[in-house]
Image (cartoon, grey):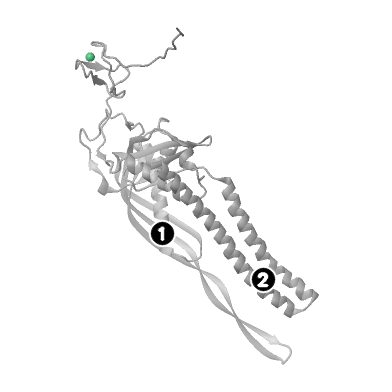
Amino acid sequence: MAEETKLKLQEVVCPSCNAAILKFNPNALINECPSCHKKLVNPLVKPKEVVAPERIIPFTTDEQTFENAMTNALINQDYVPTNIFEHCNVDKVVQTYLPMYLFEGTYNASWSCESAYEDQKVDIKRNWTDSGKTISTKTVKKWRPQNGNAAGNFAFLCLANESDKIPTELREFTRLFPYDVMMSKEYADGMIDFNDENMMTFERNADETLVWQKHGKDMVEETAKNAALNQIGNQEIRNFRASSSWNLTTKGKYVYAPFWFVYYNYAGGQFHFLMDGIGQRTEYSYPVNQEEVDFVKGKEKIKGYVTWLWVLALLLWYVFNFTTAFVYLVIWLIGKIVVNKMMDKQIQERLENSKAQRQAGANRI
Ligand SMILES: [Zn+2]
């Protein structure tokens, strides 16, 4: 008889009755044996008392919504390889509540700048041929001072955790987050299932004053400046200055905000996709099909070459005459329009074809 090969299976077994425990939650402090109903304490779980948040923005999306958002983003993103869905490895999806500080208040910015306007300048020249005078006007650009006031409200969340346990991409995404008061609720016990093995939670460990000084102040100043620039509109300006003051009405209220996060791998590279738990914002990185990028660049180059062919008209004018040059220019212009259209069509066809292939790939899995 041939020697049997042995396998080493890992089993979670009840220490009292030896029954196999098939559903074991590694995050739960206490699991119950389904056979003898004895409570089993997991020594790897360390209960820790942390301060509860004052408010919470509950998840309004599920894992399927998150996965669909990711699939759609990658289908519609140009230059993503066509076999992305067949050849990518998706890590475990992370669902998490992140500790954040809410900052609310009002700002007031006074601004000044110089804006451009057009003025007519009159030139009087002595005309030597008929000893008369020629009056010509030309338009000149002048600057005049402008100033104003912008005021408004602000409300945003800042990440309240400084540890490196949160992936860098998620940390960047959540550093500053617009706060939608309609989505948040007063926190009550039981709103988060801390035993849920798919849910990750982090405690706050950053000081609200430091967080405010580090990110909040800049954010308010940026908001005030943008409001001022918005008032100025599309004018050409120079020497823009804004000074802002603000009144903080909520300083660092502790809020739990929901996020989805996943890493995926393709051709040796690591990429990520993330979305907030209410499905309003996403952010992601993606692999690029370099061949397709080069294809599009090549077509754009051809358009560029054709544009420069007008220069030949100068040569024709020099060698022959104006009419020849003019006829050439007309032919060149028609040619340019035709070539541009052809190139744009080829680019569009290629990108749309790739998109269709990604869509087909997504449908297959
Ligand atoms: Zn048991």
Residue type at the position of mark 2: Trp
Q: Residue at x 31, y 28 (%)?
A: 197
* Drawn side of residue 314 relative to residue 66, left or right: right
Q: Is residue 310 above or below residue 265?
A: below
| Residue 311 percent coordinates (x, y) | 71, 68
* Drawn side of residue 156 relative to residue 321, left or right: left
Instruction: Give the numbered dot on residue 332.
Output: 2
Whether residue 55 is visible: yes
The quarter in which the C terminus is drawn is top left
Label 1 close to label 2 by CB (< 8 Å):
no
Q: Secondary structure at mark 2?
A: helix
Decide which of 114, 338 is in the foreground and name it.
338
Instruction: Give the numbered dot on residue 49.
Output: none
Q: Residue at x 51, y 65 (%)?
A: 236
Decide which of 147, 317 is in the foreground and name it.
317
| Residue 206 percent coordinates (x, y) | 36, 33
Instruction: Give the numbered dot on residue 228.
Output: 1
Residue type at the position of mark 1: Ala
Q: Residue at x 27, y 19 (%)?
A: 21
Residue 196 occupies quadrant? top left
